Image (cartoon, coloured by chain):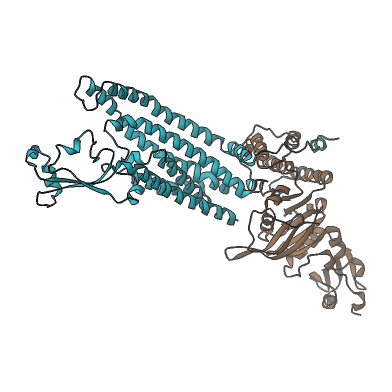
Chain colours: A cyan, B brown
Amino acid sequence: MSSLALAAVPSGPARPHHPWRRAARASWVVHRTTFLVLGALFVALAAGIVVPGLSVHRDYAQFMAKGCPGHTTMKGCPQLLAAVGGEESFLSNLAVLLHLVPLVAGVFIGAPLISRELESSSFRFTWTQGMGKLRFELRRYVLLAGSTVVIAVVLGLLIGWFAHPIERVGLTSHWDATLFDTTPLVLPAWTFFSMAAGTLIGLAMGRTVSAMAVTAVPVGGLLAFGAIPRLGASPGLIGRVLQLGPAVARSKHYLPAQPWNEPSHGVGFGPKGSWLVRSWVTTPHGRVLGSTQAFDLLSPRRAELQHYSFWYSYQPAGRFWTFEALVALALVIVGALFVVALVRLLRCNG
Amino acid sequence: MNAFEASGLGKRYGSTWALRECTLAVPRDHVVALVGPNGAGKTTLLHSIVGLCQPATGQVTVLHGIPAGSPEALERVAFVAQNAPLHQHLTVAAMIELSCALNEGFDRSMAERRLRSLKIPFRRRVGRLSGGQQAQLALSLALGRRPDLLVLDEPLAPLDPLARHEFMSQVMEEVAERGLSIVFSSHVVSELKEVADYLVVLSEGRVQLSGEIDRLLAAHSSWSGSAAKVEAIQAVVPVVQVERADRYARLLVRAPAGEAPPGWDANPVTIEDLVLAYLRSPDIQVVTSPLALAGADPTKWPS
């Protein structure tokens, strides 16, 4: 008997595995490098947040233990405040960096996911296996998108943890455009949206590099447009689009001293924990002052400011998670529509 | 029981019909050769059988009525695409692993032993294997699925003569041992007789001829005689091809050699003659079943 004949002796069917386990195994085989790079990036980013974060939390604990809130001039307190606040610029950079997570997911994982198969023709192998085209592609998408979304959730939690002391001392706000999109709710939603957009574009175009470039432009543009213009305390692009009716409040009949710099409110954030949408000043006769005149009022002549009214239009702190949920929902709905289009296109493909 | 059946199958790419009104039924337990010129629709037909393309009209079923591309069909039909497009960045071992994951009941040990016997290194990346090795790897992975129907698209095209021989030997060995049905497309008409026992000729997106090769050869013959009688013969038997030289003519007719008219030499045809004759005459009526191959009626011969 030849070796070939021996080879043909049936060894019996393999033990059946759960289809998701088999899909996970297949995804691991094909995307091992992607998973490893993703894991390494995650560990690096997480370490980059946790290590300085521990130091910030230690300083903040001392700041609280010394009873510094409200007594910032007390001995040792300015140093501790500076130590906590010194990480504010690092936090901003970190938040900008986290905006790359959805972009990287969409461009480097989503866009090549199917386009590479189409470009190399390996889809003729993959899609004709027992698992089938739709089942394999959807399970693979869910596994990869799920992994990136979980990573985004963890990174969102970590940056929230890092930002907490800095926010508590009033040196930043979670309404800030760069921080608003990096919460454990919105960052994963952006990631899901970006993955769906990238995968759909990849399937539609069938060319890896082109799909990556085309994904980068709208997803990166949306993220940047929402995050980069830090116009005071303002949520991201979609948050502004979804803006709820703002509350309008008026200060007492005198302009509070240096309201822009009052530590308890934070720099330009209106009432504590709120999103200051707009502010203006009216004269005792109700005339709205121009911005230059209003600015002059903050000069040393402020003692003469009796009976001027300081108005501010703002979103109360309690609405933060409503905004977050709305933004996340909008992104998830659009992403889900992309996934539906992806399924339809996969069904029609051929 | 049919290996596959197409009914009114049509597939269009833009304004061009790759397949049109394609109707045929191929019984199981055959090695089916699908031949035709470039652009005849061979790959489109094979892709329809394995569910890679959605027909614009009609339908395809496999293994006696299972819709092509359905989960049940995918479990039982294996496909080796043209140029064996596997994942080039994966190693041979990873491709086996991938096949195990994508196919429940994949016979891993069989695939591995087959590849070992072919001396294909497991740790080498697919992209660094020769064309012949890639084809053998694709075949081993397909056979490891233990399919009931194996579909091969131009499997011999990238291979040198030795590799072709080895590849087809492996296929025939599997047929002998397991009795699976095989459909393969090929340009290499001269080699068909050695491996195939069923022929389907496609031309311009339509089925021109299909049937068991032995029956097709027996039902066709080459007649040589006076050119003056060609029209009279054409009135009685279907003439596939006419070649004239001065006063003589050679006809390839759809009739057995023994039914040639008096005074004409009759010879059997080779499969190459048959295929080429049909391909040169794309307007010849479609024959979809051996039963349709009617012999000539000798009482109608011209005197």
Q: Is residue B234 above or below residue A119?
A: below
Q: Is residue A169 above or below residue A205?
A: above
Q: Among all residues in the image, which is located at the extreme bottom?
A: B303
Q: Nearer the viewer, residue B138 or A289?
A: A289
Q: Whole-percent x and y of residue A214?
A: 44, 49
Q: Is residue A164 left or right of residue B83?
A: left
Can you see residue B232? yes
Which residue is located at x 32 percent, y 50 percent?
A: A244
Q: Is residue A298 above or below residue A161?
A: below
Q: Nearer the viewer, residue A255 or A334?
A: A255
* Residue B92 falls in image quadrant: top right
Q: Nearer the viewer, residue A203 or B274?
A: A203
Q: Is residue A211 left or right of residue A250?
A: right
Q: Is residue A203 left or right of residue A69?
A: right
Can you see residue B89? no
Q: Whole-percent x and y of residue B247?
A: 83, 74
Quarter of the N terminus of chain A within the rendering = top right
Q: Among all residues in the image, which is located at the extreme top?
A: A75
Q: Whole-percent x and y of residue A176?
A: 31, 40
Q: Whole-percent x and y of residue B171?
A: 78, 45
Q: Is residue B162 left or right of residue A84?
A: right
- How many numbered dots are placed on residues in this image? 0
Q: Nearer the viewer, residue A192 or B24?
A: A192
* Residue A169 falls in image quadrant: top left
Which residue is located at x 38 percent, y 36 percent?
A: A97
Quarter of the C terminus of chain A within the rendering = bottom right
